[in-house]
Amino acid sequence: MITWQWAAFSELDGTAVYAMLAARQDVFVLEQQCLYADIDGNDQRAHHLLGWQEQNGKRTLLACLRCFAPGEQQAEAVLGRVLTVQAVRGTGVGKQLMAEGMRRMAQHYPGSAIRISAQEHLQRFYSGFGFRPVSAVYLEDGIPHIAMLR
């Protein structure tokens, strides 16, 4: 059972921020061997969706993403830093994360299109949520990406 937490950065406690940044480091920097500045000064302007699981009194972060309001980074709402931790990949947690993220964004930014800079190999995954390519493939931090819009 996943408990979803949707919050502005200022509403997150230190434990949540630490877990989120550690997960992003594990996935984007260590697993993908991509040396880039994940702590980019944008988290404070975003809403964050964190998926927690509690077992034996311990809360563990399984998945997260961040969202920007329309006009904050692009004309549309922007979705990014989407991840599931390695232990739950292939179990459907990523689909749950995206479904919950789409629901929250529709509530907070009704009627807005949503833009994502997707890793190219995940294009089919995001297409399942209504995203369509709007760019050619480009390199972002050394990894092939494609801009997609929903």
Image: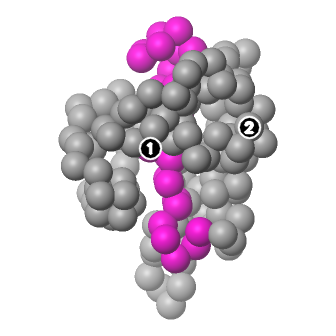
The residue lying at 58 percent from left, 73 percent from top is 88
In reply to whether residue 64 is colored magenta, the answer given is yes
Q: Which residue is tagged 2? A: 127
The residue lying at 61 percent from left, 46 percent from top is 122
Pinpoint residue 112: horizontal percent, then vertical percent: 66, 16
- Up/down of 101 relative to 56, above or below: above
> In the rendered structure, which segment of residues is drawn in magenta?
63-89
In reply to whether residue 54 is colored magenta, the answer given is no
In the picture, the quarter occupied by the C terminus is: top right
**In the picture provided, is 17 more to the left or to the right than 114?**
left
Under circle 2, the secondary element is helix
Front one among 125 and 45: 125
Pinpoint residue 87: horizontal percent, then vertical percent: 52, 76
Pinpoint residue 23: horizontal percent, then vertical percent: 37, 61
Mark linked to residue 45:
none
In the picture, the quarter occupied by the N terminus is: bottom right
**In the picture provided, is 83 more to the left or to the right than 91?**
left
Front one among 31 and 2: 31
Q: Which residue is tagged 1? A: 81
The residue lying at 30 percent from left, 30 percent from top is 42
The residue lying at 63 percent from left, 53 percent from top is 97
Residue 103 appears in the rendering: no
Q: Amino acid at mark 2?
A: Ser
